[in-house]
Image (tube, rainbow, N blue to C red):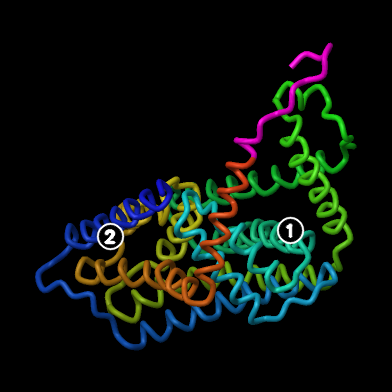
């Protein structure tokens, strides 16, 4: 119950901050209307992004010897977006995607490999896109620092997760918990849960090492495409709406940092942080007469449309995945460790 109250409060904050950001920069005759061509281009970019990301999942599945239909990949991508939007720090994304894949008949191990491959290829894609942007554009130092900081943080998380998995996979886990586990009270039912988790991690690491390189490269290519096309939406909206001379670099660079930086915001939906960051970074770049429209429609085509379609195609599954993930956490927390055998220290 507390989770949904937090979600409702966070989205109320998102709406409130959006209204503030629009009205505070409003000029006389404020209008949120944009040309049909801007909507068409933004929709095309959105469809291309979802298609490329879905191809990444399908080709990642091929890389591990599994068949994943394209439409199932679309449902998985959008369902994960919905799960991410309603949970703090996007924590519901992977549980939602995992459950959708499981219901599609994908083995648990293959699903975990596919999902980690997505994170891994996303990290490489971000690095490639950042390098390309750095070579093409002459943006402000603050913009590039924000961009590099986001990519560096994301890379550290993904590589750290992979390194931890490799270390854990190399360990042999017996029926009896070792000393370090007992010191952490990981014995009894808790140790049973840890054993199952260790087994899955070991299998995932082995499967990742033996991925088909050709399909993995294809998946990486699709990942680069989906990351790159996401940053065409704001320029498409701005340049279709105004004839004023607006520099391109900030319209490309800042959205990268804002979109990926929003993943570390604890509140669901960003809690208004995205809107405030957009206003702070681009308030003096985008002309005042179209700033409100640019913010609202950029946010729609990079966030709200994913929530709407995700809820439509996989909303029930994503909600169930979030609840199941919460149940697993509670099961682990509430699992009462069995008493230690005599002679052993807790």
Q: What residue does disc 2 label?
A: 15
For mark 2, give the secondary structure.
helix
Tell us which disc is closer to us: 2 or 1: 1
Total label count? 2
Residue 54 figure quarter: bottom right
- Asked if one can make out residue 138 in the rendered structure from this viewpoint, the answer is no
Residue 327 within the segment the image draws in magenta: no
Tell me the number on the disc at residue 112: 1
Q: Are marks 2 and 1 in contact (CB under 8 Å)?
A: no
**Looking at the image, which residue sits at the far top?**
343
Most foreground residue, 246 or 71: 71
Distance from disc 2 to disc 1, alpha carbons, whole Å, reads 35 Å
- Region in magenta: 332-346
* Image position of 258 (left or right of 322): left
Residue 345 within the segment the image draws in magenta: yes
Q: N-terminal of the two: label 2 or label 1? A: 2
Residue 296's place in the image compared with 159, above or below, is below
* Image position of 250 (left or right of 16): right
Report x, y in % for residue 221.
Answer: 70, 71
Quadrant of image for the C terminus: top right
In the image, what residue occupies the spot 21% across and 66% down?
A: 288
Residue 23's place in the image compared with 314, above or below, is above
In the image, what residue occupies the spot 73% across and 30% down?
A: 186
- Asked if one can make out residue 85 in the rendered structure from this viewpoint, the answer is yes
Q: Residues within 10 Å of mark 1 (few under 14, many from 20)?
A: many
Q: Main secondary structure of the magenta part?
A: loop
Report x, y in % for residue 24.
Answer: 17, 57
């Amino acid at each position: 119950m507390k989770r949904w109250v937090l979600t409702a409060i966070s989205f109320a904050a998102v709406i409130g901050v959006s209204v503030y950001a629009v009205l505070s920069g409003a000029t006389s005759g404020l209008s949120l209307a944009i040309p049909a061509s801007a909507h068409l281009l933004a929709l095309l970019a959105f469809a291309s992004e979802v298609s490329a990301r879905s191809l990444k999942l399908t080709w990642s599945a091929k890389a591990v010897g599994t068949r994943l239909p394209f439409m199932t990949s679309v449902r998985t991508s959008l369902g994960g977006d919905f799960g991410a939007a309603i949970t703090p720090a996007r924590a519901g994304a992977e549980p939602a995607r995992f459950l959708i894949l499981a219901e599609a008949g994908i083995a648990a191990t293959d699903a975990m490999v596919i999902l980690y491959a997505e994170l891994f290829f996303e990290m490489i894609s971000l690095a490639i896109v950042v390098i390309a942007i750095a070579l093409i554009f002459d943006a402000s130092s603050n913009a590039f620092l924000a961009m590099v900081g986001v990519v560096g943080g994301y890379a550290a998380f993904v590589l750290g997760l992979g390194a931890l998995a490799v270390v854990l996979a190399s360990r042999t886990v017996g029926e009896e918990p070792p000393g370090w586990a007992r010191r952490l009270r990981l014995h009894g039912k808790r140790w049973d849960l840890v054993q199952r988790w260790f087994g899955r991690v070991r299998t995932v690491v082995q499967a990742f090492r033996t991925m088909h390189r050709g399909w993995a490269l294809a998946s990486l290519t699709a990942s680069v495409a989906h990351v790159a096309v996401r940053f065409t939406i704001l320029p498409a909206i701005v340049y279709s709406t105004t004839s004023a001379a607006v520099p391109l670099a900030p319209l490309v660079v800042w959205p990268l940092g804002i979109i990926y930086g929003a993943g570390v915001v604890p509140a669901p939906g960003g809690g208004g942080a995205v809107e405030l960051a957009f206003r702070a970074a681009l308030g003096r770049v985008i002309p005042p007469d179209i700033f409100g429209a640019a913010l609202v429609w950029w946010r729609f085509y990079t966030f709200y449309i994913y929530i709407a379609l995700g809820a439509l195609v996989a909303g029930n599954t994503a909600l169930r995945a979030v609840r199941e993930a919460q149940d697993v956490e509670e099961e682990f927390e509430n699992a009462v460790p069995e008493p230690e055998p005599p002679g052993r220290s807790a």
